[in-house]
Amino acid sequence: MQPEVSGQNLEITDALRDYVREKTDRVARHLDNPTGAHVVLSVEKIRNIAEITITVDGATLHAEAEDKDMYAAIDAMADKIDRQARRHQGKAKDHHQREARDAKEQPPEATD
């Protein structure tokens, strides 16, 4: 997954871009079909804010984190979106397993 990285009041360096890609690759392992990812890094006085929005199978996952250090904010953002991605995939898998289990439990219909 190649995230689109943009900055507000901040110049995105190659090091920041590579760090964000490294962190989002970890998240992509948990998702089947991520269609897009957008990361916004911004600086407001002493606050460094990292936001990510990922679109997956019609669902939108969003996480935001802030810290005094940009790399720490990116780490926190990646942890949050990773938890959401795992939860999203778990619900999708459980939904499919539940349908299969319900189909097995139904008795066969009797014919007259």
Image (cartoon, rainbow, N blue to C red):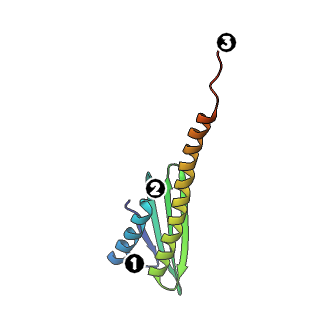
Q: Residue at x 49, y 78 (%)?
A: 73
Amino acid type of disc 3?
A: Asp
Q: Nearer the viewer, residue 3 or 81?
A: 81
Which residue is tagged 2? 31
Mark number displayed over residue 11: 1
Compared to 75, does 112 lie above or below? above
* As drawn, 42 above or below 46: above
**Image quadrant occupied by the C terminus:** top right
Quarter occupied by residue 11: bottom left
Name the front one of labels 1 and 2: 2
Q: Mark 3 highlights which residue?
A: 112
Q: Residue at x 55, y 67 (%)?
A: 63
Label 2 environment density (alpha carbons within 10 Å; few <14, some 14–19, many ≥20): some
Left or right: residue 107 versus residue 11 is right
Q: Amino acid at mark 2?
A: Leu
First in sequence, mark 2 or 3: give its number.
2
Q: Quadrant of residue 21?
A: bottom left
Q: Secondary structure at mark 3?
A: loop
* Quarter of the image with the N terminus in it: bottom left
Badge nearest the viewer, 1 or 3: 3
Residue 66, x across and y down, in percent: 54, 78
Quadrant of res 7: bottom left
The residues tagged by marks 2 and 3 sit, at their Cα atoms, a distance apart of: 47 Å
- Give me the C-alpha separation between circle 1 and circle 2: 29 Å
Q: Position of residue 69 (x, y in %)?
A: 47, 84
Q: Amino acid at mark 1?
A: Glu
User: Left or right: 51 with respect to 106?
Assistant: left
* Foreground disc of the pair 2, 3: 3
Q: How dense is the environment of label 3, judged by Cα within 10 Å: few (below 14), some, or many (20 and up)?
A: few
Q: CA distance from mark 1 to mark 3?
A: 75 Å
Compared to residue 110, the image places residue 82 above or below, namely below
Please tell me which residue lies in front, 29 or 8: 29
